[in-house]
Image: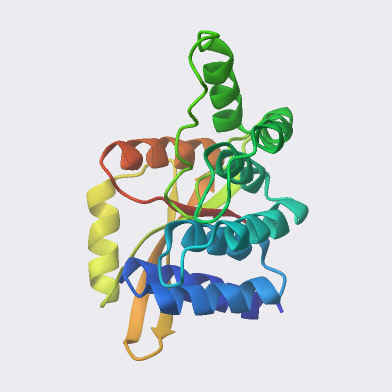
Amino acid sequence: MQTIRDHYFYGGLAAFHEDMHAEAARQWQRAAELGDHEAARNLGHLYRQGLGVEADGHIAAAWYQVAADGGVISADYNLGMLYLRGGPGLPPDKEQGMARLGKAAAAGYIPAKVELERLAALPPSEPPVAAPPASAPAAVEAAASAPVPARMQIGSYRTRAAAEQDWKRLRLKTLKPEIIANTVEGQGRWYRLVAVGPAEAIDAFCGSAAAKGMSCWSRKR
């Protein structure tokens, strides 16, 4: 079952990287229905942003809730930010938003702690305007204690050689590469380059990627 879930999860990643958002939504929904909670979180991102599906804040919140109930700490953060900011058809709910951020922060999720500190530092006369949630459907969960092995997709390539060349270019010394062949419906065979290693190293890479306007896709082992 895990192999089947991974097939749909990483198929969704490959499709998303090729801007095939409707296909990504289809693959992730199948993975979520099979119990992949990180796929559920990614569906929340798609419905929040209207990528491949009709934008709907209520459906986004529902998928974030499924992920959060499944133990994905970052989904509590995403749900909290969605409630604070509001979404398509979903009015803001500060009480719910703060409660979700508090839950994520208590579990050690650094972005939630940072956001709570930012909100606490606002002058009383200034209404708290929540920063938008992370646009990448799989932002990395920060490790609260010991390093947590994690996986991060770098990209999808037409050939294995292209994936290997990109890995050499990145020079990610603390991470190890995995190259996974995957068939995308209507697109043929693609090769996914996945980095594996400590969550802190992936967190650092995601931070630099976000600064450059790049997406970061990751998941725990």
The N terminus lies in quadrant? bottom right
The C terminus lies in quadrant? bottom right
Position in image of residue 148 (x %, y %): 63, 42
Image position of 149 (left or right of 51): right
Q: How many marks?
A: 0
Image position of 1 (left or right of 123): right
> In the image, what residue occupies the spot 52% across and 47% down?
197
Position in image of residue 216 (x %, y %): 41, 50
Q: Nearer the viewer, residue 129 or 136?
A: 129
Figure colour scheme:
rainbow
Q: Is residue 211 above or below residue 170?
A: above
Image position of 164 (left or right of 11): left
Position in image of residue 110 (x %, y %): 58, 29
> In the image, what residue occupies the spot 63% across and 48% down?
75
Position in image of residue 87 (x %, y %): 51, 50
Residue 92's image quarter? top right
Furthest residue toward right:
69
Q: Is residue 186 above or below residue 4?
A: below
> In the image, what residue occupies the spot 23% across and 68% down?
162
Q: Nearer the viewer, residue 159 or 31?
A: 31
